[in-house]
Image (cartoon, rainbow, N blue to C red):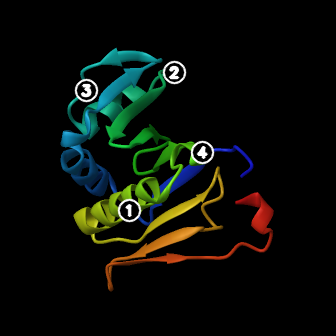
Amino acid sequence: MDGALRDIYVVGATVEDWQKVLDELRDCTPTVLVNDVPADVPLLAEVIARRAGPQRIAVQYYCEPLDLMLHFWGDDAAEFSFWPDAIGDEAGLAALLDFMRRLGRAVGKPVLVTPENSEEVPILEYDPATGDVYYHRLEDEAAV
């Protein structure tokens, strides 16, 4: 492993989709962070409105055993980030795959796990048509 973060993207997600994601994950102990300080921002519209300024908005989720950070980059652009070393074992991998399926079912769209900032290079892909997660072998397997 290279130690770099991994990202989780919901392909083609809209503001409405991200609200569905926030609603779906309420049981995962969310903590909203504004400039790295915990805050109460229950609706995505409020997150986006606050993000319009110089503030950094993120939502930290602990979906046992996954520790994920959801970053908002635009009105409909967001990604989850996690440390791949934290997956650790088969139970961690199973939790990641279940999380991908949960996101994909909530919005009915593909979900990708990629190397950091590389949406075009999926490692794992959830297909909403089949409900399956597929592994994509990278050209440079050492980068995974």
Does label 2 or label 3 sit earlier along the sequence?
3
- Please identify, in this view, whether the residue under mark 2 or under mark 1 is nearer the observer: 1
From the viewer's side, name the closer residue of 18 and 140: 140
> Do the numbered discs 4 and 3 sit on residues whose CB atoms are within 8 Å?
no
Q: Which residue is mark 4?
A: 85
> Do the numbered discs 1 and 4 sit on residues whose CB atoms are within 8 Å?
no
Marks 4/3: CA distance? 30 Å
> Do the numbered discs 1 and 3 sit on residues whose CB atoms are within 8 Å?
no
Q: Amino acid at mark 2?
A: Pro
Does label 4 or label 2 sit earlier along the sequence?
2
Marks 2/3: CA distance? 16 Å
Residue 19 shown left or right of residue 85 in the figure: left
Does label 1 or label 4 sit earlier along the sequence?
4
Q: Which residue is mark 2?
A: 54
- Please identify, in this view, whether the residue under mark 1 or under mark 3 is nearer the observer: 1
**Which residue is outermost to the top?**
37
- Please identify, in this view, whether the residue under mark 4 or under mark 3 is nearer the observer: 4
Q: Amino acid at mark 3?
A: Val
Q: Amino acid at mark 4?
A: Asp
Marks 4/2: CA distance? 31 Å
Q: Which residue is mark 3?
A: 41
- Please identify, in this view, whether the residue under mark 1 or under mark 4 is nearer the observer: 4
**Tag 3's secondary structure?**
loop
